[in-house]
Image (tube, grey):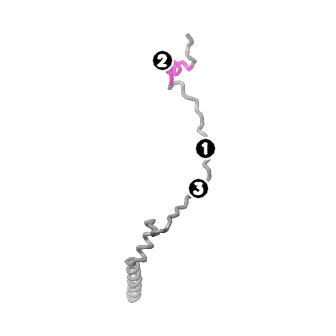
């Protein structure tokens, strides 16, 4: 029980130190710079640009279009039922 009391007392002291820091002007300034991206008057903000390697163009495979898509209904049925080319005129 005494060990737990000592542990909690130490923890309480650490929390008080943290509380006093987060209520200080130093914390507000550090938070504004680091998290908020604020700068002081006269300063210049530098944003690094991460340049990746040149992307390689992706080659799209060419597919032969399905003739049934562009065929008239009777032509599509002809191909499906007979499995032979269309009759010539």
Measure the alpha-carbon separation of dots 1 and 2.
Answer: 41 Å
Relative to 21, is 35 above or below? above
Q: Which residue does the image show at 48% across and 18% down from the upper left?
A: 74
> Between 40 and 69, which is closer to the camera in this rendering?
40
Q: Which residue does the image show at 43% across and 77% down from the upper left?
A: 26
In the rendered image, residue 75 lying in the magenta stretch gets the answer yes
Which residue matches tag 1?
57
Extent of the magenta region: 70-83
Relative to 28, is 7 above or below? below
Measure the alpha-carbon separation of dots 3 and 1.
Answer: 17 Å
Q: Which circle's residue, 2 or 3, is located before the other in the chain?
A: 3
Can you tell which mark lies on residue 74? Answer: 2
Q: Which circle's residue, 1 or 2, is located before the other in the chain?
A: 1
Give how far across and how far down residue 56 sits, in percent. Answer: 62, 46
Relative to 31, is 50 above or below? above
Cβ atoms at labels 2 and 3 below 8 Å apart: no
Measure the alpha-carbon separation of dots 2 and 3.
Answer: 56 Å
């Amino acid at each position: 029980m005494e060990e737990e009391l000592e542990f909690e007392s130490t923890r309480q002291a650490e929390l008080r130190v943290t509380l006093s820091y987060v209520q200080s002007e130093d914390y507000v300034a550090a938070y504004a710079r680091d998290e908020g991206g604020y700068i002081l008057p006269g300063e210049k903000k530098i944003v690094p640009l991460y340049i990746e390697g040149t992307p390689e163009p992706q080659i799209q495979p060419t597919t032969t279009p399905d003739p049934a898509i562009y065929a008239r209904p009777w032509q599509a049925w002809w191909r499906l039922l007979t499995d032979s080319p269309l009759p010539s005129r």
